[in-house]
Amino acid sequence: MTEAAIRAVDVHKTYRGRGGTAAVRGIDLHVRQGEAFGFLGPNGAGKTSTVAMMCTLTAPTRGRIEVAGHDTVAAAPRVRRSIGVIFQESTLDGELTAEENLRFHGELYALPGAAAAARTRELLGLVGLADRGRGLVRTFSGGMRRRLEIARGLMHRPRVLFLDEPTVGLDPNSRAGVWEHLREVRAREDTTLFLTTHYLEEAEECDRIAIMDAGRIVAEGTPAGLKTAVGADRIELRTGDDPAAARALRDRLGVEAETPAAGGVLVRSGDGAALVPRLCAALDVQVHAVTVTRPTLDEVFLHHTGHRIRADGAGEHPADPVGTAR
Amino acid sequence: MPVAVRAAAEARAGRMVWLREMLHFVRDPARTVMSLFHPLLFLCILGIGLSGLVPGEGYEAFLFPGVLVMAAQAPAISVGVSIVWDRQMGFLREMLVAPVARSTLVAGKCLGGATMATCTGGVVLAFAGVAGLPYDPLLFALLLAQLALASLTMTALASLVAVAVRRAQTCNTVLGVLVTPMVFLSGMMFPVSAMPPWMAAAAMANPLTYVLDAMRRTIAAASPGHAASSLFEPLTLGARQLPVALEMLLVAGFALAALAAAGAFFSRSDE
């Protein structure tokens, strides 16, 4: 399906009071059905406001949004039936059991009773909580709550699942667990995921991302595409004879090779990993080590906004080393 | 979607909101036990203590409807607190993003609170003997029905406050400030006929006054001994007595108006 799951046209949101803060200043967006789309930006970029508008919780000051083909203002009930929402803060009832929380959801979305019971079992299994259905939610860990919320958001088979900072406040282990289940959800349910995050590694999980800063989208594309647009991969070689190696690469492959003062040979390329075998084959000198470093999303972010995504966020949650190959 | 299907879906959602309140209620029996302490204190100490001062018989019986309403008051008010709490804890958003009318959510909450309040009052009703009332099933059924109406009125008011005042601390203060005069000015401890005109005017504007009057007249009808007491003289508006049915209708109208206002307020508020 190539139908749009979300279409936003010139969306603005200005809050009354607080000096009329403009949280969102003109967003245009097109998210395809089945896609995982990420909104990357620091806290206060306007991500949560945008999600609130898409979820019909607040109306745009200007512009319009269509979710699953329905206008979020004129056809809010239809939009609500088509979406699942996982908010930044937990919205579970701790005094109810996991099953009761799901049942509450099923009743509010008027799911047929027998189907809802079957769906409850299916989803608790999907998120790895099959044996905790009768447990009171207040006894659950943060990761378990998040997974239960994902299950709840999927109860009514939404076409689009919104996740606002889905793993904020979770330890790396729980975060990995949540993503494992989200990947499974995508594979099994063909649900469109729309998530906001200020974690770079979470953005890497998306098919496409939009970088948001100060209420505007400053860049949009696939994570790899955005990184390629910003700069090439760095290939660093440690060889027995660096100047000879650089010369050989220039002569035989026609690639620009530098020999930095610190030693080694440095080559830049759009697709570093693919070039490595050719580099090695072209060299007569001994190669001790090859390191490929891809530009990180943090560099992409810096390039488009002029600042790093968030000093504290990066500290607690370092950029993913996925681009490093050895 | 056809209207009937829509209505059925709203009814299911409202029922589930009600059921959630019930689950909270049965899982926290300590709260119910504690909320019984205050009204029973009033009945057994204030009632028995003052009965020696008040000429004639039956002050405990006079006080009894007020004690019932008092027992219902704490759980009824807790609906307002629970709406604010749901907002604070985030659960409210789970309800707000669902395809359900906000007035349905308010109605479910209020009916839940009214059920809890009526059940709590029902426990106090078992102490009717202390106040010298006969254990008459019809009397109990009528008193419970009247208590349910009083409970719904109080929950509707509490939810109106909760949707209008969003800050938890402010909401608790407003509820406390609102409820105490409502109980004092309802003729609970002394009859409206004994009030100076300004106070009586305030009492006549209070829906609980009519509930208590209706309850006393129900008691007097079932227990003729009390009917003779001057304490049990029915409420008069000008020189006329209002029929009990009309009193109940007035209170029901008030409760529905408060409920509608709360629903409207809730629907209008952004987020």
Image (cartoon, helix red, strand yellow):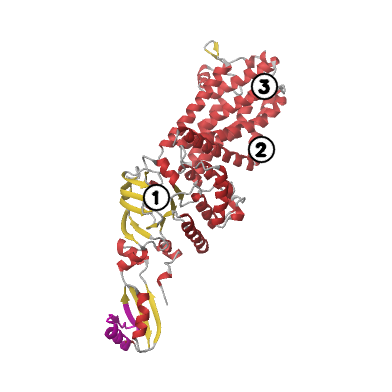
Q: CA distance from mark 2 to mark 3?
A: 25 Å
Q: Are marks 1 and 3 on the same chain?
A: no
Element type where label 3 sits in the image = helix
Where residue B154 appears, as percent x and y from the top left, is 54, 30
CB atoms at circles 2 and 3 under 8 Å apart? no
Q: Going by the image, does B53 lie left or right of B163?
A: right
Q: Pinpoint the chain carrying mark 1.
A: A
Residue B267 inside the magenta-drawn segment:
no
Where residue A239 appears, as percent x and y from the top left, is 37, 86
Any part of residue A180 in sight? yes
The residue singled out by tag 1 in the image is A51
Q: Quadrant of the image for the C terminus of chain B?
A: top left
Q: Are there few (<14), some (14-19), or many (20+) residues within 10 Å of tag 2?
A: few
Q: Are there few (<14), some (14-19), or many (20+) residues within 10 Å of tag 3?
A: some
Q: Going by the image, does A316 lie left or right of A131?
A: left
The residue singled out by tag 2 in the image is B33
The residue singled out by tag 3 in the image is B139
Where residue B78 appears, as percent x and y from the top left, is 56, 37
Q: Quadrant of the image for the N terminus of chain B?
A: top left
Q: Range of the magenta residues? A: A243-267
Up/down of A174 relative to B88, above or below = below
- Residue nearer the viewer, A154 or A188: A188
At label 3, the amino acid type is Leu
At label 2, the amino acid type is Val
CB atoms at circles 1 and 3 under 8 Å apart? no
- Mark sitting earlier along the chain (2/3): 2
